[in-house]
Structure formats: C-alpha cells, structure tokens
Amino acid sequence: MKAVIVALVCASLLLVSCRTNESPEAQVDDLQITAQVKSKLASDVGVSSVTNISVNSTNGVVTLSGQVDSAGIRDKAVTVSKNVPKVVRVVDSLQVVPKPQ
C-alpha cells in the first residue's frame, strides 16, 4: 500500500512539473532567460533589491513579481528584463512598498 501511495505522489509531482504548452527547446530557452534576467537584475539593480523579486519565464514572456522599495527600482527591473535576449515581453506584477524609516 505504501508503494502505491509513493508512486501516486511521484506521478502527480511529475505531472505538475510538466509544461505541455511548450516544446522542450522552449522550456530550455525559458530556463536560460530566467537565469539571465536574475543575473542581470542582481548586477544592474542590486542584490539587496533582487531578493524580493520573483522571475518566471514562459514562451519568452517574463513575469516579475514581488516587492521593491521604489518605483525607480521597479522601472529599472522592467527595463533590464526587457533587454535580455529572447525576451518577448515583460509582465510587471511588482508592488512598490517603501522601507519603513
């Protein structure tokens, strides 16, 4: 019985992690895009700002979500992301939440 439960859990995890709307090549491109965006954000925006930014890429569309300290940081994060090769579009879901003084 335990083996059946383990097999069902493993199968459901595999199904959740599969993205059937993308070819394997597109999935690799999206992983590369995500890594490049994260790297560029860390170097151009600053590591302390990037820790609260989540980056996701699907079919070349990059979604930025999370919290940043200012509109300037948000705008810079969007601009940096747009300039990464193979990025088709950037969806800005970042929230500006100023640091408490």
Image (cartoon, rainbow, N blue to C red):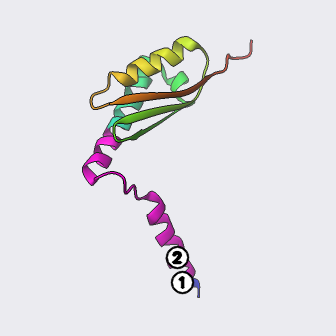
- Secondary structure at badge 2 equals helix
Task: Write the residue at 41% across / 18% down.
Answer: 79
Mark 1 nearby-residue class (10 Å; few <14, some 14–19, many ≥20): few
Q: Is residue 28 above or below residue 94?
A: below
Picture coordinates of residue 53, whole percent (x, y): 53, 30
- Secondary structure at badge 1 equals helix
**Is residue 23 a member of the stretch shown in magenta?**
yes
Please provide the residue range marked out in magenta: 5-32
Disc 1 vs disc 2: Cβ atoms closer than 8 Å? yes
Instruction: Name the residue nearer the viewer: 61 or 100.
Output: 61
Picture coordinates of residue 36, whole percent (x, y): 34, 32
**From mark 1 to mark 2, how far is it between C-alphas?**
6 Å
* Residue with the mark numbered 1: 4
Q: Amino acid at mark 2?
A: Leu
Q: Is residue 2 above or below residue 35?
A: below
- The quadrant of the picture occupied by the C terminus is top right
Task: Write the residue at 52% across / 15% down.
Answer: 73
